[in-house]
Amino acid sequence: MAKQPESHSFMDMFEKFGKELKMPKVDVDAILDHHRKNLEALEKSAKATAAGASSIMARQREMVEESLHEIAEMAQSYRTPGMPKEMMAKQADFARKSFEAAVKNTGEVAEMMKKSGGESLDILRERIKEAMSEIRQGYDKKG
């Protein structure tokens, strides 16, 4: 019967390679745990970003609905006959209100984006701090 070739897992081959090079033993579980935590942090960050984007989209939709409602009200007021001076005053008032609402809405959306981005970055910053601590602890064990 033909001899079956020995099958080695990737980890076995990596360990054998390390022994042959007389490298220090690698704690594979620690490495895998480290990368698992990195992936979890990326996932949390992505979820925070997605939640922020959803909130922004919902708020922008509300803003558009409010604007359409105001436009409909303005259109109704134009149907009633009035003096040209009154019509111009209404148009100027509407333009002023529209501008103020646009500035307010832009500021609100910008603040929401800042908060969402900040939450996402905070998650990643925290993971980087943890990773640096893990690396320091690994060196302290060897020293």
Image (cartoon, rainbow, N blue to C red):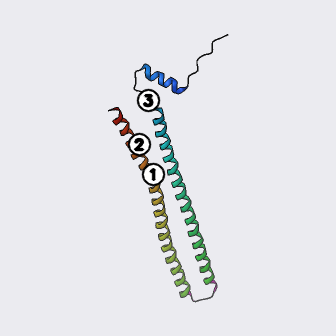
26 or 50, which lies in front?
26
Mark 2 lies on residue: 131
**Which mark, by number, is residue 40?**
none
| Separation (CA) of disc 1 from disc 2 | 12 Å
Q: How far across and how far down the image is residue 29, in percent?
A: 48, 35
Residue extent of the magenta highlight: 78-84
On the image, the x and y values in percent for residue 1 come to 67, 10
Circle 1 Cα neighbour tier, 10 Å, few/some/many (<14 / 14–19 / ≥20): some
Residue 80 spot, x, y in % from top left = 63, 87
Q: Secondary structure at mark 1?
A: helix
Q: How many marks?
A: 3
Q: Which residue is mark 1?
A: 123
Residue at the far right: name it: 1
Q: Secondary structure at mark 3?
A: loop
Task: Residue 83: give x, y in percent of width and height.
Answer: 57, 89
Q: Looking at the rendering, which quadrant does residue 130 occupy?
A: top left
Q: Point out which mark residue 26 bears.
A: 3
